[in-house]
């Protein structure tokens, strides 16, 4: 089965997506997600200029060899642009192989290990009443685990927190106002936000205390610190949140410096999740071998595909570390489907992030996976179970959009 065509599809139904579609000589097609939020066209160019020409004529069944060819063959290893590109090829080839077998992809990955994937949703509010409303809405939708982010007194806006219901949301058509901090705002340049770590460290424990008082001890709660703390600040936050029994605390430090996580671990038993900006198994080496984290955040899209992420999960399992795959709206429905098939099969599944895609996104990407009673399920369609509608996609052209940047109150740039 030879690859005859590979197309790079860029569309913006609610937000930007980069999708690779591979076609074989027997007419099968496979999809892969290559979306890199705010740097989409770099990946599109890497694929169309440097990868697509190498794919034509290759045996579509040779997934591992193609992965090694693109990884080792580039000479320049790793990096988000390269690894998102390899991920798209790898995912599309798994989609094709499963379609050729007439099976949903998870069957090729070892079959079902569980009924569905426990998911967490993004509740947020500028203040406690809005946060409680948001948590209740998520619970009514079936979510069994909740990420909690709130406004911070003194700061005009905080990333990850939907704007006040009382303010005019001003969101793009086709986006969910619950998630109006995502997509990245459609602007020629990033929006600038302000940040005050001390105010945050004072406020966060009061929020979790209030949430536990309102919702009880059982509900799994998660929180994302978005890489903004020093090691000792992270240790302090982990310690101050211990009474509220978090499922995890995410991205406490910019984890390029992996050794600093030792300091955080010395001080707190709050479980740690890291890795949504990592792109290779090597980024996890020290974190795994010293058991400095509890959950792996990489999605299929940014870690080199199903082949690579499965390898990361197997390595993690040696240290009793579990999956906690990144699932924001900038991972496309193709990337999410790949996570669902992988998550249903692996032994060390932990939790799946699930921010729901907008109706516009789901008109372009028709998905077989379902969300029932708080669980994501892959469906039984052959392959990944996602179809891409070119016609609908054509009405949503690319628009430049960026995540916000973050400055301290004195104006200096801060970690994102
Ligand atoms: O900021 O997906 O855990 N989720 C997150 C996300 C990320 C965006 C970056 O592209 O941190 O909201
Ligand atoms: Co995060």
Image (cartoon, helix red, strand yellow):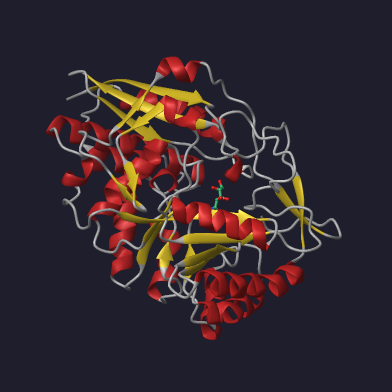
Q: Residue at x 23, y 31 (%)?
A: 96
Left or right of 109 on screen, residue 135: right
In-front residue for pair 55/141: 141
Left or right of 48 on screen, residue 60: left
**Which quadrant of the view contains residue 211?**
bottom right
Looking at the picture, does residue 127 appear above or below residue 367?
below
Q: Residue at x 44, y 41 (%)?
A: 84
**Which quadrant of the view contains residue 62?**
top left
* Percent x, y of residue 230: 66, 71
Looking at the picture, does residue 385 appear above or below residue 266?
above
* Percent x, y of residue 176: 56, 38
* Percent x, y of residue 55: 32, 27
Left or right of 275 on screen, residue 236: right
Left or right of 309 on screen, residue 262: right
Q: Residue furthest left?
A: 101
**Does residue 200 appear anywhere in the picture?**
yes
**Does residue 73 appear anywhere in the picture?**
no
Location of the N terminus (image quadrant): top left
Q: Residue at x 24, y 27 (%)?
A: 58
Q: How many marks can you see?
A: 0
Looking at the picture, does residue 71 appear above or below residue 43?
below
In-front residue for pair 365/81: 365
In-front residue for pair 282/331: 331
């Amino acid at each position: 089965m030879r690859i005859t065509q590979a197309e790079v599809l860029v569309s913006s139904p609610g937000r930007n997506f980069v999708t690779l579609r591979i076609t074989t000589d027997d007419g099968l097609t496979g999809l892969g997600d290559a979306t890199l939020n705010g740097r989409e066209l770099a990946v599109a160019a890497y694929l169309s200029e440097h990868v697509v020409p190498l794919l034509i004529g290759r045996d579509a069944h040779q997934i591992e060899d193609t992965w090694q060819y693109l990884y080792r063959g580039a000479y320049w290893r790793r990096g988000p642009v390269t690894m998102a590109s390899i991920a798209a090829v790898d995912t599309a080839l798994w989609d094709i192989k499963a379609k050729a077998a007439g099976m949903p992809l998870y069957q090729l990955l070892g079959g079902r290990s569980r009924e569905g994937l426990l998911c967490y949703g993004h509740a947020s509010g500028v203040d406690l009443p809005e946060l409680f409303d948001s948590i209740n809405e998520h619970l009514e939708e079936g979510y069994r685990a909740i990420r909690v982010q709130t406004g911070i007194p003194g700061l005009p806006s905080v990333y990850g927190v939907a704007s006040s219901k009382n303010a005019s949301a001003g969101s793009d058509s086709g986006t969910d106002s619950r998630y109006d901090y995502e997509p990245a705002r459609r602007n020629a340049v990033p929006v600038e936000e302000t940040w005050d770590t001390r105010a945050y460290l004072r406020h966060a424990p009061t929020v979790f205390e209030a949430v536990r008082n309102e919702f009880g001890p059982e509900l799994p709660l998660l929180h994302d610190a978005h890489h903004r703390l020093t090691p000792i600040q992270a240790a302090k936050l982990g310690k101050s949140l211990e009474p509220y029994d978090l499922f995890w605390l995410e991205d406490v430090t910019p984890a390029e410096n992996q050794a600093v996580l030792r300091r955080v671990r010395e001080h707190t038993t709050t479980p740690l999740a890291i890795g949504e900006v990592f792109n290779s198994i090597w980024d996890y080496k020290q974190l795994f071998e010293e058991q400095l984290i509890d959950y792996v955040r990489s999605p299929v899209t940014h870690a080199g595909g199903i082949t690579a992420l499965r390898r990361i999960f197997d390595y993690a399992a040696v240290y009793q570390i579990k999956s906690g795959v990144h699932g924001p709206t900038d991972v496309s429905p193709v990337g999410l489907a790949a996570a669902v098939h992988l998550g249903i099969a692996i032994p060390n599944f932990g939790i799946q992030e699930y921010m729901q895609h907008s109706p516009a996104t789901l008109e372009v990407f028709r998905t077989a996976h379902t969300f029932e009673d708080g669980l994501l399920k892959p469906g039984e369609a052959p392959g990944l179970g996602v179809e891409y509608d070119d016609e609908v996609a054509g009405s949503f052209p690319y628009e430049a959009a960026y995540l916000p940047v973050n400055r301290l109150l004195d104006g200096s740039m801060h970690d994102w």
